[in-house]
Amino acid sequence: MLKSTKSLLLAALAATFATSADAQTTPQKGEGTQMPESYRSFFPAAALRGVKSQMPSTSLFNERISDNAPMARPRLNPPASAIKRAPADQSDIYGYLYYTKADQNLGMYRINPSEGATYMWTDEYTDWSMPMTGGWMRNGLLCGLNAMSFMGGVLSYGQVELDLSNGDVVSWHALRNNGEELQNTYLTTAYRDLDDRVYGFGYADDGQSYSFNSAEADDIDTSVMVRSLEFADLCVSLCYNIQEDMFYGVTTDARFVKVDPKGNVTPLFKLNVGSKSTLTGLVYSPSHEAYIWNAYFEGDKSAFYAIKPEEKSVTKLYDCPAGEEYIYMVCTELNVQKYRKPHPYI
């Protein structure tokens, strides 16, 4: 459970997110922008609340807060140098813990997929019940989306840049959140270096159908539909491999697929591990020569697997002790194949 030192009440009811002269007004109790009902089905039953369910819901409203009470902004920090390369006995895989049954901090963890994860930091937005819902590496920074949810509605939705080494907030800006134009709402995301764009799976503008969408990396509100798709082809885990200029993902029916930048989905093989259709991290690890996947199961159980599409194999590496859901993962290791020119993966 997230151990916060700040007021959860202030976070839930704050009326202003000020990032410049402009401000985003947070709706009052119960007035959050409503997402499609299907949105909630992709999360663990107890999730979509920013913090663990053990926190009594009545504690959010046991005091009166002024309608104009401002939410303090995080300290904005200049970008530091990229996080240092891991020693040989450590991992270059990082995952954002969105949900767990245990009494532990939400936020960023350094993941050794065969041994577990080590807590690194909790950013200030997560500490204010506005957790990240997607992430990618760009220009040495951890970038992504975050959202504050309550009673099935989204109170605030934004795009954030962080220092991966310590979680310091470099920048944040509000994204469109009107409940009518949903193309900027992503279930899974991945960054494509070759055109400096973010791609991912989410909703068409009508909120009734699914699509593969893309946006300028600086502004997710520029999202456009690349291709409409059926529910079965929707990826609940997604990553990008620059060596192949291809996205790889796990679909709602647990197929491992590759997806080209035009949104064409090619099934590779069925994973057959009994996983549940839940949003979890997937990342390519050059040192493992495999895609590392955080699979989620009924009963709030989870595990790390290594997926090798050439062999059509999926191998369990580690059972997570408390049903940890790492909603996205990134890898800072240089993605190099000996027979190809090196490309930076971040």
Image: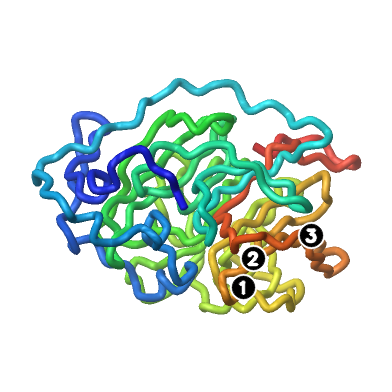
Image marks 1 and 2: residues in contact by CB distance under 8 Å:
yes
Please state the horizontal and vertical placement of residue 254, each as a whole percent of the image.
Answer: 66, 75
Mark 2 burial class by Cα count in 10 Å: few <14, some 14-19, many 20+? many
How far apart marks 3 and 2 lie (CA) works out to: 11 Å
Which residue is identified by label 3? 317
Please state the horizontal and vertical placement of residue 271, each as a whole percent of the image.
Answer: 74, 74
How far apart marks 3 and 1 lie (CA) works out to: 15 Å
Front residue of 58 and 92: 58
SS for callout 3: strand
Which residue is identified by label 1? 297
User: In the image, what residue type sits under mark 1?
Assistant: Phe
Front residue of 263 and 105: 105
**Residue 53 appears in which quarter of the rendering?**
bottom left
Q: Which mark identifies residue 302? A: 2
Residue drawn at point x = 19 percent, y = 29 percent: 21
Instruction: Say which label, 1 or 2, has the lower sequence index.
Output: 1
Q: Along the horizontal axis of the image, is 330 left or right of 341? A: left
SS for callout 2: strand
Residue drawn at point x = 59 percent, y = 63 percent: 323
Mark 3 burial class by Cα count in 10 Å: few <14, some 14-19, many 20+? some
Residue drawn at point x = 15 percent, y = 55 percent: 28
Which quarter of the rendering shows the C terminus? top right
